[in-house]
Amino acid sequence: MALLNILQFPDPRLKEIALPVEIFDQTLLNLIDDMFETMYEAQGVGLAATQINVQKQVIVMDISEERNQPIHLINPQIIKKENMIEWEEGCLSFSGVYGKVNRSQEIEIQFLDKNGKQKSLHADGGLLSACIQHEIDHLNGITFYDHLSPLKQQLLRKKLSKVKSRTL
Ligand code: NI
């Protein structure tokens, strides 16, 4: 297991597009393990492979309070989406800032597990649904920032520079 470096906005590599996983081997299992370790260490609820500069369609998530319900999604596809809600989101690539994004409340996805087995998942509202959409966006080179209005993007960049200067 190893901790991976999470790319920080505005790193242009966050715009890279992930390719479908075709080989289900030990390298993939190691990647998933490392992504979980990195996500838990950073206290995030989700992490997409593009955020650690790996252009593969791999997502790890855990939305439970107890941090004991790991979910991994490979080659996820949204096959149904219904009803919009506004959801306040953060992101491990934007530490300390948040923004409101419109998401579908109800989604159905198809994906593969780490053994290449086809699975489906129905998420009905709340964090799970928003988180899946947020992470699938990452695989397509899109961050929650891209969903904000130009004015809100500007405010977010200002806040981000303040957070950074406090950290230094
Ligand atoms: Ni994110």
Image (cartoon, helix red, strand yellow):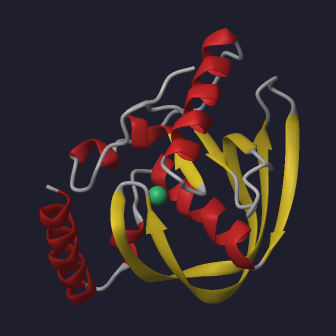
Q: Position of residue 91 (x, y in %)?
A: 44, 62
Image quadrant where one finds the C terminus = bottom left
Q: Position of residue 81 (x, y in %)?
A: 73, 73
Image quadrant where one finds the N terminus = top right
Query: Of residues 27 and 147, which is closer to you in this image?
Result: 27
Query: Of residues 80 and 98, which is closer to you in this image?
Result: 98
- The residue at 63%/88% (across/down) is 85
Res 125 quadrant in image: bottom right
- The residue at 35%/68% (across/down) is 96
Horizontally, residue 92 falls left or right of residue 115, namely left
Q: Is 166 located above or below residue 15 in the figure?
A: below
- The residue at 51%/33% (across/down) is 19
Q: Position of residue 12 (x, y in %)?
A: 22, 46
> Exactly how many numbered labels are in the figure?
0
- The residue at 17%/66% (across/down) is 166
Query: Of residues 87 and 118, which is closer to you in this image?
Result: 87
Q: Position of residue 65 (x, y in %)?
A: 73, 64
